[in-house]
């Protein structure tokens, strides 16, 4: 990676929107979108924003908890809005907001939100540095600050799990 690729970038440069239509193969017998399919699409949407930010391969390191707020039906459009909240050394926190759109009624509802951590890697899987993020709007600044708090919470939780595993061994 060249130093030119490491210049800080505004959040808007990573912003992505992805839309999927829910087909019968994506649904359970009740016609509701499968949770696993939604998680798959969230991961892809997050990877899109991470890739746009660092212009390298990215791998998913973690995803915070998910709540499914409203059901999504076969035939609905699912809209994924993603962008980089903050970049660290080799990792980035990506925020993904999921909406369901009824294109007949022209309505949208919030389905879920997720925070994912992606790591930039080369083709051999070695970690690469990523550019820093420049938050410009008040919302971007709020998400930028929140990303640091969430990162610390994830690190603390990981340490607790490691300690619990070591205690069992």
Image (cartoon, grey):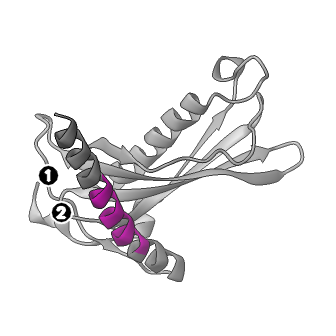
Mark 1: few, some, or many residues within 10 Å (few <14, many ≥20)? some
Q: In this view, does 104 lie above or below 24?
A: below
Mark 2: few, some, or many residues within 10 Å (few <14, many ≥20)? few
- Front in this rendered view, residue 63 or 131: 63
Q: Which residue is drawn at 77% across and 53% down?
A: 108
Asked if residue 58 is among those painted magenta in the image, a careful observer would answer: no
Q: Percent x, y for residue 12?
A: 45, 67
Q: Is residue 10 visible?
A: no
Q: Residue at x 10, y 42 (%)?
A: 126
Q: Percent x, y for residue 107?
A: 83, 52
Q: Residue at x 44, y 40 (%)?
A: 43
Q: Nearer the viewer, mark 1 or mark 2?
A: 2
Q: Can residue 166 be seen in this view?
A: yes
Q: Which residue is drawn at 17% across and 41% down?
A: 166
Q: Distance between the residues labelled 1 and 2?
A: 8 Å
* 102 sits left or right of 144 in the view: right
Point out the residue furthest to the right here: 105
- The residue carrying mark 2 is 89
Q: Is residue 13 above or below residue 141?
A: above
Mark sitting earlier along the chain (1/2): 2
Asked if residue 153 is among those painted magenta in the image, a careful observer would answer: yes
Bounds of the magenta span? 146-157
Query: What's the magenta bit mostly, secondary-structure-wise?
Result: helix
* 115 sits left or right of 159 in the view: right
Placement of the N terminus among the 4 image quadrants: bottom left
Q: Residue 72, located in which quarter of the rendered image?
A: top right
- The residue carrying mark 1 is 128
* 71 sits left or right of 91 in the view: right
Q: Is residue 124 above or below residue 127?
A: above
* Element at label 2: loop
Q: Percent x, y for residue 29?
A: 75, 16
């Amino acid at each position: 990676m060249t130093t030119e690729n490491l210049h800080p970038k505004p959040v808007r440069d990573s912003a992505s929107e992805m839309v999927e239509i829910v087909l019968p193969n994506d649904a359970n017998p009740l016609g509701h979108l499968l949770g696993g399919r939604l998680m798959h699409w969230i991961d892809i949407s997050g990877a899109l924003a991470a890739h746009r930010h660092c212009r390298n391969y990215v791998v998913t390191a973690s995803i915070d908890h998910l709540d499914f707020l409203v059901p999504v039906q076969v035939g609905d459009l699912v809209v994924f809005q993603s962008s980089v909240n903050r970049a660290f050394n080799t990792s980035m926190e990506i925020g993904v907001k999921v909406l369901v759109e009824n294109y007949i009624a022209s309505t949208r509802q919030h389905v879920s939100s997720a925070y994912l951590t992606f790591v930039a890697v080369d083709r051999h899987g070695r970690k690469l540095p990523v550019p820093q993020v420049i938050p410009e709007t008040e919302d971007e600044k709020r998400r930028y600050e929140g990303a640091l708090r969430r990162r610390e919470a994830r690190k603390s939780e990981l340490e607790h799990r490691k300690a619990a595993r070591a205690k069992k061994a």
